[in-house]
Amino acid sequence: MTLHWKLVADAADPHAQADFWAATLGYLVEDNSALIEELLALGHASEADVLTAHGRRAWRDLIAVRHPDDPYDERTGTGLGRRILFQRVPEPKTGKNRLHLDVHAAPGERDAEAERLTGLGATVLRRVREPGGEWIVMADPEGGEFCVH
């Protein structure tokens, strides 16, 4: 049996993180507005639970990005394939990530990709050169580490 999964990332500002990672990966920010409108109309959600992002209703405390080629539920907007869900948490990041993404640039484009990501709000933490390869360790806008290979 195989299991369906998603990566969940804690965030201070889930919408800003979703925008960063959607731009980084070429993913789409999920559109859950139809589901939200339905739940608001039924009284199962309140205006305090939502905000407007990208010109549509979105959950205030969580938002996901999904691969544009993967299937999704048309009624809810929820991705059914590769996706990252960002959820608001009250505590700040305090240590090194125990899990991180590796982003693979096209051959010979690592530095250009790192420059593009810096323009999106990432920072370069260090450059690594080891017998097993070279990569750039970066941090997303909230300090989450990731590598560019």
Image (cartoon, rainbow, N blue to C red):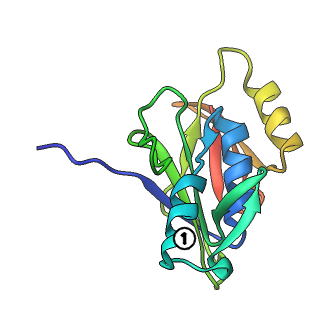
At 49% from the left edge and 63% from the top edge, which residue is drawn?
Answer: 98
x%, y% of residue 82?
44, 40
Above or below, comparing residue 84 to residue 95 in the picture:
above
Instruction: Specify the farthest residue to the bottom.
Output: 90
User: Quadrant of the image for the N terminus?
Assistant: top left
Q: Determine which quarter of the picture holds residue 128.
A: top right
Above or below, comparing residue 72 to residue 125 in the picture:
above
At 56% from the left edge and 72% from the top edge, which residue is drawn?
Answer: 40
Can you see residue 113? Answer: yes
At 89% from the left edge and 41% from the top edge, which residue is drawn?
Answer: 119
| Residue linked to disc 1 | 41
Judging depth in this view, the residue of 55 and 141 nearest the camera is 55
Q: Amino acid at mark 1?
A: Ala
x%, y% of residue 149?
62, 31
At 82% from the left edge and 25% from the top edge, which residue is drawn?
Answer: 112
Above or below, comparing residue 148 to residue 144 in the picture:
above
Above or below, comparing residue 69 to residue 128 in the picture:
above
Instruction: Specify the farthest residue to the front.
Output: 41
- Number of other residues with Cα within 10 Å of mark 1, as a class: few under 14, some 14 to 19, many 20 or more: few
x%, y% of residue 53?
75, 57
Judging depth in this view, the residue of 49 and 44 nearest the camera is 44
Instruction: Specify the farthest residue to the top.
Output: 107
Judging depth in this view, the residue of 56 and 95 nearest the camera is 56
Q: How many marks?
A: 1
Q: Is residue 53 left or right of residue 50?
A: right
Instruction: Specify the farthest residue to the right.
Output: 119
x%, y% of residue 121?
84, 50
Tag 1's secondary structure?
helix
Can you see residue 138? Answer: no
